[in-house]
Amino acid sequence: MPRSVPLVPALTACALALALTACTGSGAQGTSGAPGASGVGDPYFPNAGNGGYDVTHYALTLAYTPDTHRLTGTAEITARATHDLSAFDLDLKGMQVKSLTVAGRKARWTRKGQELTVRPPATLPEGETFRTTVRYSGTPETITDPDGSEEGWLRTADGALALGEPTGSMAWFPSDNHPSDKATYDITITVPKGLQAVSNGELRTETTTETTTGDGSGATTTYSWRTTHPMATYLATVAIGHYDITRTTTKNGLPVYTAVDPHEAAASRKVLARLPEIMEWEEYNFGSYPFSSTGAIVDRRGDAGYALETQTRPFFPGAPDTATLVHELAHQWYGDSVTPKTWRDMWLNEGFATYAEWLWDEDHDGDTAQETFDALYKGDYYDNKADSEAIWAFPPAKPTSAAHISDSPVYERGAMVLHKIRRTVGDARFYDIIQGWAAAHRYGNADTADFTAYVEKMAPGKDFGGIWKDWLYGDGKPARP
Ligand SMILES: [Zn+2]
């Protein structure tokens, strides 16, 4: 996500989130095992995710009709029990559950808020891999975040769009909705013929089914997408509408698939033509690309409030500028491949993606990263005092609440931390660190403590104590730049 535009603080939503911190499991039904917890204990989103199992694969079969806003879905979730499991939760907000099976047998379920509690007919032993199949339908919801931004299922000018950071994916499929549980995906979407459906990964098949009614009104097209590398739920996307599709490859042979709303085609052409060049620059600087395709989805400006680094295919509301494209593509390494353990570690996404913008500028006749750092420190980076002061509101590693995880301290001050490390270790070691970090945690999860330990290991004899204390964890503006 690019940095957020300051919004009215949504204190009510935040207070509500804090009031729901109790993460008790649902009542056990069997005589053995225990229910999985209804949250994984995220410090900002306590109900996000669930305990007792790890998902390895989601197979989502969806059908959507923009005219009626109706979504019909089947989610087949393959997971492994992490303890003897008498019951477990999935996260699903809205929608009606029609049927539910575990390992092919009917299971009972109850719903409360975003928790869909499943009671399998028999206890699932620790270590067992089991498949849960949920059939559901309804009008999917748009979710308003604690910071006031909208995500989940969004209706667009000519279709719909699913964006999930931080919790919106529960609006369109049941899941273990937390970045700590990554999985592979098959996402199949059926839409009225004439519309496209774009998602993550690679398009495997596209099949149109004509009807016999003669007027073609019931004809549909089914798009099957596959993501073969682990993906966090918040990075899953579906974009339905009219798109100009362009397929090309980078010099390294990486497939590039872009889908652009025709209204944004002219404004997007020049910047998207640079996508292969940006990918090559990022591979040079960040190390080999972790995924098997790339691209972009561009919808109309009003279709969403922010861009998002949806895996392999970042989303943009309106034609992006080069900086935003650099930012969202950099997230493929920092955020999508190396994913935060909790939402408190968001700066590991946004500090890196913001610093990627600075490095791009520096390498392309713009300001040096040092100049950008200095302008932020002096307070003349932004036009107004409020924005200049806002970057010191809290330390990047400790956002004050869920409403602030997308504020400028996480972005700009996070990037300043990386610049301080670069100045301490020099360029050669710095690039070793950022490439090594992406390689060491590729496809995994990491937190701030993992990062500081990694930096210290990579630069023995250097003292980072002041950077961690003043820039990463310290309140207020550090006394010296
Ligand atoms: Zn971002």
Image: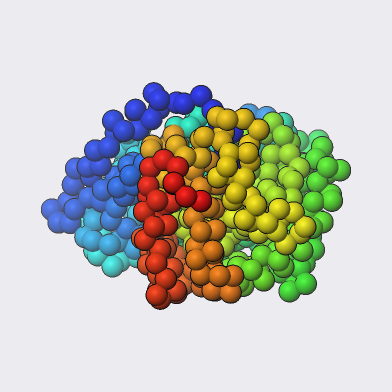
Above-or-below relation of 197 to 361: above
The answer to whether residue 29 is left or right of residue 202 is left
Q: Position of residue 362 (x, y in %)?
A: 70, 58
> Which residue sits at x=67%, y=71%?
284
Q: Residue at x 40, y 25 (%)?
A: 11
Q: Position of residue 94 (x, y in %)?
A: 45, 33
Is residue 141 at least partly visible in the picture?
Answer: no
Q: Is residue 4 left or right of residue 263?
A: left
Q: Position of residue 213 (x, y in %)?
A: 76, 37
From the viewer's perspective, is residue 337 above or below residue 23?
A: below
Q: Residue at x 66, y 65 (%)?
A: 282
Q: Residue at x 65, y 33 (%)?
A: 383
Q: Is residue 23 above or below residue 447?
A: above
Residue 317 in the image: above or below residue 423: above
Residue 195, horizontal then vertical, whole percent: 74, 42
- Whether residue 420 is visible, yes or no, is yes
Front position in the image: 325 or 364 = 364
Q: Quadrant of residue 99?
A: top left
Compare residues 56 and 398 and report the one nearer the observer: 398
- Relative horizontal placement of residue 473, taking residue 317 as reference (left or right): left
From the viewer's perspective, is 406 left or right of 269? left
